Amino acid sequence: GNSVTQMEGPVTLSEEAFLTINCTYTATGYPSLFWYVQYPGEGLQLLLKATKADDKGSNKGFEATYRKETTSFHLEKGSVQVSDSAVYFCALSGLNYGGSQGNLIFGKGTKLSVKP
Amino acid sequence: EAQVTQNPRYLITVTGKKLTVTCSQNMNHEYMSWYRQDPGLGLRQIYYSMNVEVTDKGDVPEGYKVSRKEKRNFPLILESPSPNQTSLYFCASSPQRDASYNSPLHFGNGTRLTVT
């Protein structure tokens, strides 16, 4: 079935370090891919998205490229800040899977802590 | 302000005592959904609705009920709560009839439920 696998956390980095959070997916068809972020005490917010192979989504200094050949959508940021501390979720959506057409399937989330 | 509002934010109850968690959105969104978030399991979908009077089961619907009598409201009902329903619950909505590339999810701030 369709699924999303994220690297397990927590991830702890120092400020200004480079961030990569790995995400791979299994899906039939051509899903759209998303990264959502959850700041402490809040709901999830869309961070970035991509809809087809080689698309790059970007927002707030974060980037992710839709790689169909490796079925991946890794999240990267060149220089993290303390304010980036949050839980990051990779997700996919598409048609005709699991009886829930058009719904999102989320990864388990990766907690990022950035120390000053 | 455009938002998804859940109430209450925190709820402690006892086994078997019926409860309702309310969810309301002011964005005229078509699609609404409930998720639960548990450590190590990420987000799992409980129920969703693509339109008024149309609801369907997600991945973990057992023990829950929903209704969509009005477009803006999508309450989650636990008729007889049990301790395994202790979790963090999120309501979400999206503009179109699914959660796709052009129709990302907007989340509420969550309801932390404890069933003793």
Image (spheres, helix red, strand yellow):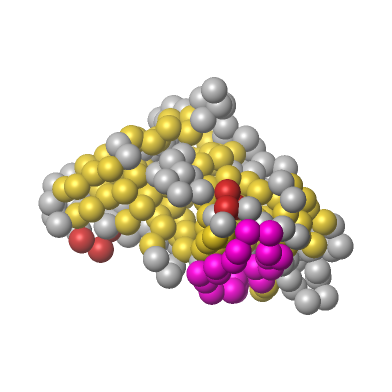
Looking at this rendering, what residue extends furthest in the bottom direction?
Answer: A70
In the figure, is residue B11 to the left or right of A3?
A: left
Question: Residue B62: which quarter of the image?
Answer: bottom left
Image quadrant holding the N terminus of chain B, namely: top right
Find residue B29 and report its image quarter.
Answer: top right
Q: In this view, does A79 lie to the left or right of B60?
A: right
Looking at the picture, tell me which residue is in the foreground, A31 or A75: A75
Identity of the residue drawn at 32% across and 39% down: B9
Q: What stretch is highlighted in magenta?
A: A1-23
Residue shown at 74% from the left, 50% from the top: A61
Q: Position of residue B15 (x, y in %)?
A: 13, 55
Question: Extreme front residue here?
Answer: A116
Q: Is residue A53 magenta?
A: no
A37 versus B50 height, above or below:
below
Residue depicted at 47% across the width and 63% down the height: B42
Residue A87: x and y in percent read 53, 58
Observer-nearest of A73 and B94: A73
Compared with A40, B53 (above or below) is above
In the rendered image, residue A17, in percent from the top left (x then y), is placed at: 68, 64
Q: Can residue B116 be seen in this view?
A: yes
Q: Extreme right residue here?
A: A54
Is residue A2 located in the magenta-colored stretch of the structure? yes
Q: Position of residue B12 (x, y in %)?
A: 19, 47
Which quadrant is home to the C terminus of chain B?
Answer: bottom left
